[in-house]
Every structure is written in structure tokens, then in C-alpha cells.
Amino acid sequence: MRYRHIPDSDSLFRYCIYPLSFKGKQFAWEKLVHLKYCQDKGTLRGSLAWERYVPTTKHVHGYGCRVASYMNDDLRTHGRSLEKNRRIYCGAYRLNGSAVSALATTNALDEISSSEVVHHPENGEIAHTDLRISLNRGDFDVEATKTAIVDRLWNACSGPLKYTDICDQDIKTHPSSALNTPPAGPYSDTRSQLYRVWSLIRFQICNWVWRSFCQNATK
Amino acid sequence: MPNLLTNIYPHSTVILESTSVPREHDQAKPGGQNVIRNDSEFTTAITISEGRIFTVRASSTDIIGRSEQIQEYLELGEALNEMVGLEEDDEWKIDAPVYTTACYIASELMDALYPAPRVFNHGPKSVVFNWSVGTNNLYLTISPNRISALRSSPERIERRVDYSLKQLTNPALFLSFIESRHQGQAFTLIKAVKAVSDPSEFFDLRRHEIQAHPGQR
């Protein structure tokens, strides 16, 4: 499958996992998007899900639950206690592709040369995308750049789409209750009914084709 | 590891009835005791410590506010202490040099009467102090040898300023970062964060908008 740049008009989702996006029991929005710095390439990277391949709320939550499950499997593999470190999917926030591409043209973020979201299926997840931010060479603090990016992305988010997975129903106070509404307000699906049906059909076809022919090539 | 913020020794405090002249027995308390007298508008606080007497006139709300602020900074100090002591792979772990710089900045902010910030990090190499007023934010991203201030609104980044290690080692320079002056115009970066009674004032700084110059973005 050809990796492609995601259009500015398309929506993306960022899943929220406890305790990674939390400080104690409180939601820490600053930790919603984790940015990893690759010094040799001069890039910051993060992960998002593309609405094209999570066309309904149910698909969004399905994706988030699987991410939490992969993390718990990873903890088990490394012999870490699930009691203390258990990852819990809490919900997702939506943002537009335009919010990401705008980072490169934002006033006061001169160190960013380009910013894009690229479709990059991984771990069997067709909806997975890479957030790729390229930085110029120069004398600036990457950590401060991360602060500015996190601030801009949070301000572009809408939501939350809260969710409690069946496997987490034993939790007395589910951490999803702590999720905050971002400055842009709650999530609202503005797509027409017709477009939603079309999105679902397109997803089913693409997903079937990908699982049948392409999945092994993208592992 | 010593923590600058938790090395504060508590003094007991007694609030007495209103009178204009301190009574003799007020000052006879053992060392380390505060005697606070309620006047109509102001409170006189007498601190007796190591045989020295300091008299401060301040409003009672100032003193109560100050004690709350110290408590908040103690909690900040504890949070930083916890962060530096976490396991290497913990999301909230910070490196020791980051911790040292963050404590220094926090103690300067506390001395300058700024309210305690929220704290978060992006990883072990920095810590971020954050103040929010409504949907507007002020961040100080603190690395071992740098500090970067950012003020933002939902619509845009209003201002960013970077400061080097050299500017951090001199408290006077550091405080000038908080209340910096450019081109003859007073520019108070987090003035209204300091003014707890009206924090919204902080974000009403557009009238002081400064043209970008080297070191600013």
C-alpha cells in the first residue's frame, strides 16, 4: 500500500489512555499527544488515527481499545505488573488535518519546516497515521517546541468521546470521567448521513482489500 | 536530594485583637513565633526568629494568601521531588539537572510572589510550569540550561521568549525575564499571574505588544 499524505480537510483522532495521559487521577491534556524526537532526522513524531478508517464512533473506540490491549500485552511480555500499570482506554479527541499542517505556518514556530500526517498502517491497524514534524537546524530548545505544538494541537481538539470498554467495567471510578472538554468544545459529527454511509462502505471495501492483500507488507 | 522548596521552617501564628500598639507580652514569645495583630485595615505581623524581630505591615488577606501560596509551592516541590525519584521508564520521570533548575526557578517565582504553577513534562529532559486563565495559557519550559516562555490563546501563540543559562544564574536577570522591559516600554510577562485578585489582567497585554527582536519569536 502506498503511504499517503492525509488531506487537511480530513479528521483525525487521538486516543486517550490511562495512565499515560493522566497525572494521578486527573486528566493531563498536555500528555494527550506524545511527541518523540528523532535527533538524527530532526523530526518529532506522534500517532493519530485517520477517520477514513475509523468511520464511526464505534470504530474509533475499537481502535483505542486495541491500542490499550497491545500496551497491556507488552507489559505482560516484559514481566511488568498489570495491577499497577494497567492501560485503560478512556476515549478520544478529534482534530482536523489542517491543525497539523498549520503548525508549519504558525507565527512563533519558525523552527518547524514542515508538518504533516502520513497514512502508515502498523500492528494490523489500517487507521494508524504518523504525525511528522520536521525541524530546521538551529539553536532552539526542542522541548519548548514540544510545548508549543502540544498547546496548538490541544486548542484544535474537540471532544471528548468517552468510552468504557467491557473489560474495564470492573473499575469503580473509570478514568474516562476525568476527561476535559478542550477549548474548541465538544465533539460533533458534522458529516451528512449520506456521506457517513459512503464513508462506511468505503472503509469496508478498503479494509477488506488491505487485510486480503496488503497487511503482510505493512507489518 | 535537597529540595529548595521544602526547606521552609514553619512558624506558629497567633492572631490577636485589634490595637495600634504591640503589647509587651506579644514580643515575649519564644523564637520562631509570629504575632499578628488585626487593625481596621492592616495586620501587623511580628516575626521573632533567632533573637531578631521583624515587623511587617500587610493586609490580613495578603498574609492568608501568602500562606496558601507557600503551601502550593510546597506541593510543587514535593511533585518535583517525586518526578526526579521515579523509575527511568516512567512517563513523568525528570533528570536531576532539570530538577535542580526547576527548583531554582520555582523558588524565584515564590519569592517574587507568583502563584504556584501546574507542572508537567514531555520526558526526562525538561519540565513545564503552566498557568491557565480561562482558555489562555502561559508556559515556562525549563531545561537544564535554558528556559522558554510561551503565552497562548485558543487562536494563536501570542509570544515566545527564550532565555539562556547565563540569564538564569543571575536572579536579577531572571526576574527581568518576568518583568522585562523592551524599547522603553514596560512589559510584564506574567504580571497578572502575580496579581491573584485579578489574573485576567495578565492576558490583557496586547497593548504592550513588542516587535520581535533577536532571541524572541
Image: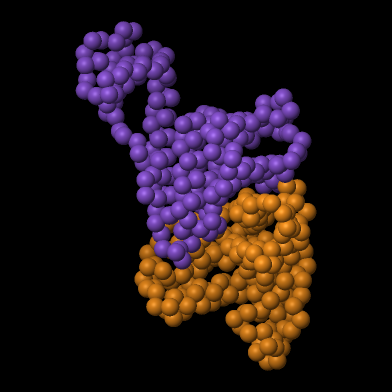
In the image as oriented, which residue stretches furthest toward the bottom? A212
Instruction: From the top left corner, tell me how far across and down residue B186 is, in percent.
Output: 67, 26
In this rendering, does residue B115 appear at all? no
What residue sits 34% from the left and 8% below the top?
B20
Identify whether A89 is placed above or below A31.
Answer: below
What residue sits 67% from the left and 61% below the top?
A95
Q: Quadrant of the N terminus of chain A?
A: bottom right
Instruction: From the top left corner, tell me how far across and down residue B32 is, in percent.
Output: 27, 26
Instruction: From the top left corner, tell me how far across and down residue A116 is, in percent.
Output: 74, 65
Give me the chain that's purple. B
What residue sits 61% from the left and 75% below the top?
A59
Instruction: From the top left corner, tell me how far across and down residue A47 is, in percent.
Output: 63, 68
Looking at the image, residue B163 sits to the left or right of residue B183; the answer is left
Q: Tell me the quarter of the picture where residue B216 sits.
A: top right
| Number of numbered markers | 0
In this rendering, does residue B168 appear at all? yes
Identify whether A127 is placed above or below B176.
Answer: below
In the image as oriented, which residue stretches furthest toward the top? B21
Identify whether B127 is placed above or below A77.
Answer: above
Q: Tell me the quarter of the picture where residue B61 sits.
A: top left
Q: Colour of chain A?
A: orange
Q: Tell me the quarter of the picture where residue B57 sits.
A: top left
